[in-house]
Image: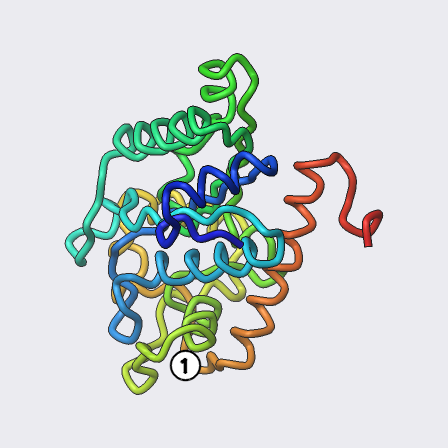
Amino acid sequence: MTEIRSQFDPNLREIIKKNKQVAVIPIGSIEQHGPHLPISTDSDIVTEIARQLSEKRNFLLLPTITYGVSFEHAPFFNLSIKESTLRTVVIDLCTSLFANNIKTVFIINGHHGNLKPLKNIDKKLGKISKNKLRVFSLSYWHFMQKEFDHAGFVETSLMLAISKNVKMKLAKKGLVTDGMKQQQINNLGKLAAISFPKVTKNGIWGDPRKATKKDGQMILEEIIKNLEKKCQTCLTGHSLKLHQ
């Protein structure tokens, strides 16, 4: 792994010149995660996932874009940027990477609200680069079996695995969808995308009270393993198993 923020210009240019490099851009958010998790949770988790993925695959790791589209959490605390802003920043960064002769980029997304501005960004950048730049946008929660939540069991377990900044004594049960019909859950999801507090009351989707560091480590390993396989397929068209 090459973490570009710690590199020196001559060395970095030499690394890029010697081998075809693949860059990773993590994107998170700054928003409420209940009373027990820090507002940096999305950014913290996606940063660690991107770091481990880059280490395993020897990718170039860019600094995390820590701000995302989180207006739906108001009036709970959030520091948000517009969808158009995030999209422009990502396009500019990828275009800049391309200008530095880096032609493959993986965007690792850590916040649901970022999905819309990242949609079809690969096609936009393909057009800009005349199909010489390949961009893959991947949201990490698509690479685990457990159903994702917000400050619930999954996110809390992941944070316990990577951070000491978790206050489990303050963890409270939020919206639990067990027993609900899928259509009802889908409707709640649509409403949450507009106003999260109207759906969850306390800003939590799920129940974090039984979250553990061990569960977080297991979920993290699963995500990294599946992301690694996906990256291999994106790069070569072949699964990782064929190359082990």
Q: Specify how the rendered protein is coloured.
A: rainbow
Residue in the picture at 56% in, 17% down: 131
Q: Could you classify mark 1 by the number of other residues whose Cα lies within 10 Å: few (under 14), some (14-19), or many (20 or more)? A: some
The picture places residue 51, in percent across and down from the top left corner, at 48, 58
Residue in the picture at 31% in, 56% down: 199
- Residue of label 1: 209
Q: Does 177 sit left or right of 74 as displayed?
A: right
Q: Is residue 82 above or below residue 181?
A: above
Q: Quadrant of residue 171?
A: bottom left
The picture places residue 168, in percent across and down from the top left corner, at 34, 83
Q: Nearer the viewer, residue 228 or 188?
A: 228
Residue at the front extreme? Answer: 10
Q: Does 158 sit left or right of 64 as displayed?
A: right
The picture places residue 229, in percent across and down from the top left corner, at 69, 50
Q: Does 63 sit left or right of 225 as displayed?
A: left
Q: Is residue 222 above or below residue 80?
A: below
Residue at the right extreme? Answer: 242
Q: Quadrant of residue 170?
A: bottom left
Q: Nearer the viewer, residue 18 or 54?
A: 18
Residue at the bottom extreme? Answer: 169
Q: Secondary structure at mark 1?
A: loop
Number of numbered discs on residues = 1
Q: Does 114 sit left or right of 203 as displayed?
A: right
Residue in the picture at 43% in, 56% down: 46
The picture places residue 70, in percent across and down from the top left corner, at 27, 47
Amino acid on which the number 1 mark rests in the picture = Arg
